Image: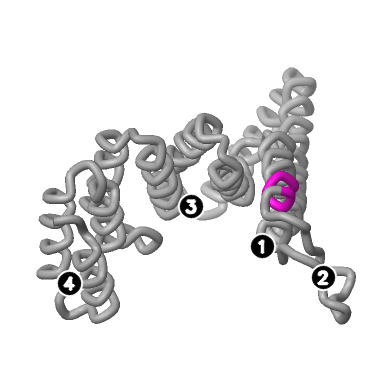
Amino acid sequence: MDSRHRHQLKQDEFKDSLVQIEEYIKQHYKEIVNVAILVIIVAGLTGGLKYYTDRQEAAANADLGEALATFRAYVGQPTPDAGPANTSYATAQEKYKKALQQFEAIVNKYKMVPRPKAVEIARYQAGVCQSLLGDHAGAIQTLTEASQDHDRELASMAKFALAGELASTGKVPEAAKYFQDLADHPTLSVPKATALLALADAYRDSQPAKAREIYERVEKEFASNAPVAEAVKQDISTLAP
């Protein structure tokens, strides 16, 4: 077969393909249009969702910033040169009540999934406020929820605060489990030495011998760490015989 015939055959095949495609489009026009519209809608929703998520994230961060400013606010009479942004509170209790309201409002306001990081921080801070206000049952519940966060650092902070709350309410065995788990799985937010010292502190009153054993273990393991070694030395010196 010469090249001219081969070229003609290819053109015929191409024409046949075009005819078949045209016929298919005629028969399935509605389906094709619907799919095209669906693709456009999905693309639009994806872009819109990202825009919405970014806006929510920014709003949550702004709300968290205000709540943290309250939490860290000055307690006492404001100084004469204090600006309007330097809010002060007459008592620590008043300050923490206000901060708690703000933190809880953030948790309740942003229900999107996944939640902005600011929401999980607000939950942790709400538990801390509850603890400082003497609401031990509320603090334990809130900090337990915060300790299950997927962020390892934040979860460690919540577990540490939760263990401290349990210890302060006499639930030392439960607190000890958390402190030991934190020591076995240290993080940047809760290093091993910090968890072990807290564990020893929890045993100071009920089991001073056990507390001493843990202090001495920390003293030996972290002998090269001057701040830790000095802290342990002081803890041991004030421990009951």
Which residue corresponds to mark 4? 222
Q: Which residues are magenta?
A: 94-98
Say which label, 2 or 1, has the lower sequence index.
1
Mark 4–mark 3 distance (CA, rounded to whole Å): 89 Å
Q: Residue at x 79, y 20 (%)?
A: 30
Q: Secondary structure at mark 4?
A: loop
Mark 3–mark 2 distance (CA, rounded to whole Å): 100 Å
Say which label, 4 or 3, has the lower sequence index.
3
Q: In the figure, residue 101 lies in which quadrant?
A: top right
Which residue corresponds to mark 2? 78
Q: Is residue 85 magenta?
A: no
Q: Residue at x 19, y 65 (%)?
A: 236
User: How crowded is the residue under tag 4: few (<14 C-alpha within 10 Å), some, or many (20+)?
Assistant: some
Residue 50 shows in this picture: no
Say which label, 1 or 3, has the lower sequence index.
3
Which residue corresponds to mark 1? 72
Q: In the figure, residue 227 lies in which quadrant?
A: bottom left
Q: Nearer the viewer, mark 1 or mark 3?
A: 1
Q: Nearer the viewer, mark 4 or mark 3?
A: 4
